[in-house]
Image (cartoon, rainbow, N blue to C red):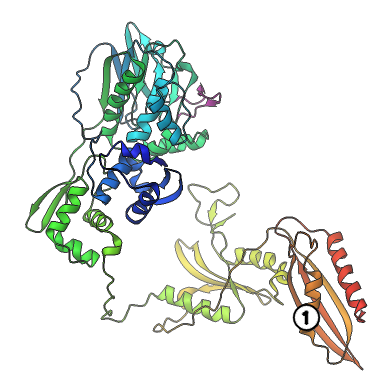
């Protein structure tokens, strides 16, 4: 999420450090920074904080606590007006599961036109194009406090002198033309905002529709700041390929109260930049929020972190985080603010203390010696022993699919219609793995392919972990529990130093044999061959010789026959026989020029 330092500064009287320092501050105490361009930071907000930190207000709140500098104002701590329901605006939510809060406002006398320069500049700083003063106001509120809002032409919501704003579940097959030109067919799973006629005008939390689009001469508008259920919103955004900024926020669980703050914030901003009169608000909630309390002790905090913080240190952290609390001795009862949905258990509070104090301030402590001998997990131990034994004998471990064409257990949520069962054995998958890998033995540099698998099968009404092997002697499996499990030993550490990916394109194998004088060093000759065969296109310097080795040697009189196997493969395309033949001709000509006789 892009965050403007200039925008953040509006929350503080004291000057903020430059963007680079802010980036370091957030990195070490809160969130990773993807990049910094000028005075704009791209902040990678973690999913557990999406409900309160996908906004400038949220990041300002974090910086206030970390840097210990007060905010001059907090839009989520202002006293909201008490606005009784009237008779001009009706808000009806038919599906409270998909929309726990319905929040709307009706305005008249609005004049749509260009936005003031300050509003344009704020939005452009975070990569948003200015549309008009009303639309820009709705976007500003989203990036400012994190609440997506939307503006509709009120005309289509009017009926009998009343503006009727509703939210319902979509109907399967219902058509909706979206802003931007795309047209979608609804599935019956999405929340939609409907007009007075019951027609869908918006995919709730995702994208607005053309049916109630603002026009240049629109003077009466309906503003929406309703809250939509996260899972259904995410699915709808994916279904219609509409990964909008609104959807990114709604797919996180958001506090119900944010809708209320959002509707008041957007109406006031619209009135400020586009004029008009706020006729009426309409807010309906499916539930009332209750204050959460989390109890944590000073000892619990210090024991968890390995620190020696005092009660005054903890109280200072809570003050900086704007967390209400009561203290009885060394026990704190914390009352998280409504937007901090992530603070639920004592460990959440401990984590807050750690990151505000600073992880670098927590001393390193050696772990105490474990007083007892660790218990042995039979299956885990047997698996480790089997891996060590079989890999030392030249076997490679494979992991085959747990789904099969037939079996005893039918999968409720099928991956596909081809393999709807859980496997009843390992042997079927191992046979397939052995066959596929045997085709690649030259590429792998193996004489024979031997594979094994440790995995679960479902048969006889139970689950069982099996060991399966596949080699030239056949395919077999035995229960893992049949392998003995003595005490743990010190197993050797893997000597592997480097891993590299396989190409997805097929390889080509070519052999070359030649007569050489007795005493010729095969390795020296192989180095010469590698140099000549290493690239089809020296101009591009692309190494295509992926494996080469001596595979045969015999003596006849005063001569020695050496045979080499060369394996070619590209990471960019499928090589042709013509290309392989061309490079082999190049190698042959070079060797003949050195006096070698090609067999």
Q: Residue at x 32, y 6 (%)?
A: 161
Asked whether residue 180 is drawn in magenta, I would say yes
Residue 500 is at least partly visible in this image: yes
Task: Count the marks.
Answer: 1
Q: Nearer the viewer, residue 346 or 189?
A: 346
Is 55 left, or right, of 429 in this rendering?
left
Q: Looking at the rendering, in which quadrant would you find the C terminus?
A: bottom right
**Residue 13: percent from the left, percent from the top?**
25, 39
* Disc 1 secondary structure class: strand
- Residue 584, picture quadrant: bottom right
| Residue occupied by mark 1 | 550
Q: Nearer the viewer, residue 124 or 469?
A: 124
Q: Residue at x 72, y 58 (%)?
A: 505
**Magenta-tinted stretch:** 170-188
Residue 31 is at least partly visible in this image: no
Is 445 left, or right, of 119 in this rendering?
right
**Residue 250: percent from the left, percent from the top?**
38, 36
């Amino acid at each position: 999420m892009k965050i403007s330092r200039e925008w953040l500064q509006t929350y503080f009287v004291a000057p903020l450090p430059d963007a680079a320092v802010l980036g370091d501050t957030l990195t070490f105490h809160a969130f990773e920074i993807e990049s910094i361009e000028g005075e704009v930071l791209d902040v990678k907000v973690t999913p557990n904080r999406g409900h309160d930190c996908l906004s400038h207000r949220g990041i300002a709140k974090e910086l206030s606590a970390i840097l210990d500098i007060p905010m001059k104002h907090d839009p989520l701590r202002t006293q909201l007006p008490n606005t009784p329901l009237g008779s001009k605006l009706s808000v009806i939510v038919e599906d409270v599961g998909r929309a726990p809060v319905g929040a709307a406002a009706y305005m008249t006398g609005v004049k749509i036109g260009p936005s003031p320069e300050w509003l344009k500049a704020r939005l452009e700083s975070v990569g948003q194009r200015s549309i008009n003063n009303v639309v820009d106001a709705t976007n500003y509120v989203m990036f400012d406090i994190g609440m997506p809002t939307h503006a509709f032409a009120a005309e289509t919501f009017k009926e009998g002198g009343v503006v009727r704003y509703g939210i319902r579940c979509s109907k399967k097959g219902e058509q909706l033309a979206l802003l931007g030109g795309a047209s979608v067919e609804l599935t019956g799973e999405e929340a939609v905002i409907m007009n007075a006629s019951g027609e869908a005008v918006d995919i709730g939390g995702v994208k607005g529709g053309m049916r109630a689009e603002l026009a240049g001469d629109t003077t009466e508008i309906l503003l929406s700041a309703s809250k939509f259920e996260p899972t259904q919103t995410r699915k709808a955004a994916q279904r219609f390929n509409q990964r909008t900024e609104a959807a990114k926020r709604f797919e996180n669980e958001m506090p119900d109260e944010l809708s209320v703050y959002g509707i008041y914030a957007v109406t006031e901003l619209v009135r400020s930049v586009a004029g008009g009169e706020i006729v009426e608000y309409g807010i309906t909630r499916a539930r009332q929020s209750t204050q959460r309390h989390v109890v944590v002790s000073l000892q619990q905090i210090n024991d968890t972190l390995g620190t020696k913080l005092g009660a005054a240190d903890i109280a200072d952290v809570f003050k900086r985080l704007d967390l209400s609390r009561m203290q009885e001795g060394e026990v704190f009862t914390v009352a998280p603010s409504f937007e901090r949905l992530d603070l639920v258990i004592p460990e959440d509070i401990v984590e807050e203390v750690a990151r505000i104090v600073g992880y670098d301030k927590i001393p390193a402590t050696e772990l105490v010696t474990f007083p007892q001998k660790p218990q042995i997990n039979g299956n885990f131990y047997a698996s480790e022993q089997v891996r060590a034994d079989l890999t030392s004998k030249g076997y490679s471990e494979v992991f085959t699919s747990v789904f099969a064409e037939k079996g005893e257990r039918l999968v409720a949520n099928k991956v596909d219609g081809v393999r709807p069962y859980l496997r009843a054995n390992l042997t079927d998958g191992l046979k397939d793995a052995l066959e596929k890998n045997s085709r690649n033995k030259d590429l792998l540099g193996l004489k024979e392919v031997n594979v094994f698998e440790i995995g679960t099968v479902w048969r006889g009404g139970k689950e069982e972990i099996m060991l399966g092997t596949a080699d030239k002697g056949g395919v077999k499996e035995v229960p893992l529990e049949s392998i003995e499990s003595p005490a743990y030993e010190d197993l050797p550490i893997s000597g592997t130093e480097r891993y590299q990916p396989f190409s997805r394109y097929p390889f080509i194998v070519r052999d070359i044999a030649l007569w050489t004088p007795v005493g010729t060093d095969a390795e020296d000759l192989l180095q010469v061959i590698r140099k000549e065969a290493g690239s089809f296109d020296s101009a591009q310097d692309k190494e295509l010789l992926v494996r080469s080795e001596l595979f045969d040697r015999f003596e006849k009189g005063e001569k020695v026959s050496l045979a080499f196997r060369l394996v070619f493969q590209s990471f960019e395309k499928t090589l042709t026989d013509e290309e392989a033949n061309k490079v082999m001709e190049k190698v042959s000509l070079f060797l003949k020029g050195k006096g070698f006789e090609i067999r």
